[in-house]
Amino acid sequence: MELAQSFGMDKPAGALVAKILPGSPAEDTDLEVGDIILGYNGEEIESSAALPVMVGRTKVGETVKLKVMRDGKTRIVKLKIGQLPDKDQVLASQDDPEEEQTDTVLGLSLRALSEQETETMKLDKGGLVVLDVQGDPAKFAGIRKGDVIQMVNGKPVDTVGDFKALVENLPAGKYVSLLVQRPQGPEFLAMRIPEKP
């Protein structure tokens, strides 16, 4: 429910886009990480588990219409169904996030990923590695040491300064969505902004 609220929704529904694979059919569309797919060819998507079933029964080469919510507004995105790329074809780009000192924000001890870490983790962009989790809101959200935060409320974060700028003026009690990379893949988490001391 908190994650739905962080995206401006009353209740959980749809499938959240956590990653767009290079070379995949989605890469050639207007889809973005953080979009919520609410409909597939006129059918409502109740949960993320429903989407793969719908895609699986669609022929390769067929064009489908996705009802997508982004920034609180719905739009239609056309997608031509194709084959997923082989894992060997998916290459991480070589972004060079600015090196930065460790800093603590909202109970999270953070530092920017190095270019080498980004490549080693096979990430398509940089982010912030969580070195320690000290605050209750961060712990309650499920953020763990070793997580890599790549987006806050749909905006990329490459430096601790980016993260601070996106969260420092948010009101206490508001939920923010965090795109977190873990070894098993990307995941969205909702974190509540704590009261200021």
Image (cartoon, rainbow, N blue to C red):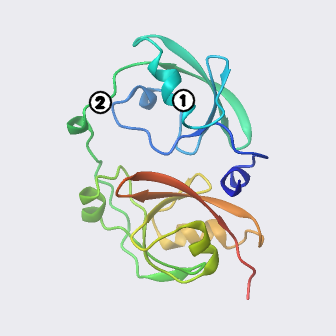
Q: Quadrant of residue 14?
A: top right
Q: What residue did someone put label 2 on?
A: 85
User: From what the image shows, is residue 185 above or below residue 91?
Assistant: below
Measured along the vertical axis of the image, is residue 52 above or below residue 131? above
Q: Nearer the viewer, residue 144 or 157?
A: 144
Q: Residue at x 44, y 18 (%)?
A: 81
Give the residue type at disc 2: Pro
Q: Which corner quadrant of the image does residue 36 belong to?
A: top right
| Category of crowding for the residue at label 1, using alpha-carbon neighbours closer than 10 angstroms: few (below 14), some (14–19), many (at least 20) | some
**Residue 131 got which mark?**
none
- Determine the residue positioned at 24% across, 63% down: 116
Vertical position of residue 180 compared to residue 108: above or below: above
Q: As shown in the figure, which amino acid type bears the numbered disc 1?
A: Leu
Work out how far the residue at label 1 is from the one at label 2, CA to CA, in angstroms.
Answer: 19 Å
Residue at the spot 73% in from the left edge and 53% down from the top edge: 5
Report x, y in % for residue 152: 58, 59
Find disc 1 in the rendering and name its residue: 51
Query: Mark 1 or mark 2, which is nearer to you?
Result: 1
Residue 52 in picture, x, y percent from top left: 48, 29
- For the point 28% across and 47% down, the residue is 92
